[in-house]
Amino acid sequence: MIRVKRGNVARKRRKNILKLAKGFRSSQSSLFRTAKQQVLKSLRYSYIGRKNKKRDYRRLWIVRINAALKPFSLTYSQFICGLKKSHIGLNRKMLGQIAIFDNNAFKLLVNMIK
């Protein structure tokens, strides 16, 4: 049986892991075994973080809309229900931006719903 030499492949795999671990603390950036564990954990955290970011922004937009509706004595849920009934297809991101930067347009929206 012919012996297979894996030197180049193994070295490349280890170098890639250590490159991803650059900037980690202590042995987690220099020793392969601990670096691999930490890289796997950090990749998991980054995946979860991307999902959480979407949640956080949606919550922020809802808070902004709700705060802008306080002077009109409307709740957020009443406002969204009114938007759906009047077939206005603005998403929460746009509504949040309008609420902050363009008060007149937001007033028009609220008056259309009322």
Image (cartoon, rainbow, N blue to C red):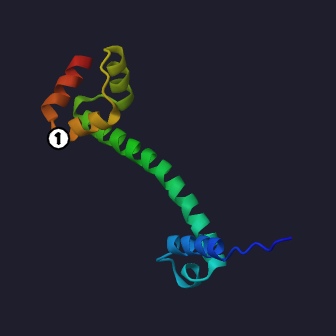
Residue 76, image x, y percentages: 35, 31
- From the viewer's side, name the closer residue of 108 and 28: 28
Check disc 1 and report the residue beneath it.
101
Local packing at callout 1 (Cα closer than 10 Å; few below 14, some 14-19, many 20+) is few
Residue at 82% across / 72% down in the picture? Answer: 2
Outermost residue on the front side: it is: 2
- From the viewer's side, name the closer residue of 108 and 58: 58
Residue 114 visible in the picture: no
Residue at 26% across / 18% down in the picture? Answer: 113
Residue at 36% across / 39% down in the picture? Answer: 62
Quarter of the rendering containing residue 38:
bottom right
Residue 53, image x, y percentages: 43, 50
Query: In the shown orientation, is residue 5 left or right of residue 95?
Result: right
Residue at 49% across / 55% down in the picture? Answer: 49
- From the viewer's side, name the closer residue of 24 and 33: 33
Residue 94 visible in the picture: yes
Residue 87, image x, y percentages: 32, 15
Secondary structure found at label 1: helix
Query: In the shown orientation, is residue 89 left or right of residue 37?
Result: left
Query: In the shown orientation, is residue 100 left or right of residue 29?
Result: left
Outermost residue on the right side: it is: 1
Residue 44, image x, y percentages: 58, 59
In this rendering, the count of numbered labels is 1
Residue 22 higher or lower than 44, as above or below: below
Report the amino acid beneath label 1.
Phe
Outermost residue on the left side: it is: 104
| Figure quadrant of the N terminus | bottom right
Quarter of the rendering containing residue 32:
bottom right
| Figure quadrant of the C terminus | top left
Query: In the shown orientation, is residue 70 left or right of residue 8?
Result: left
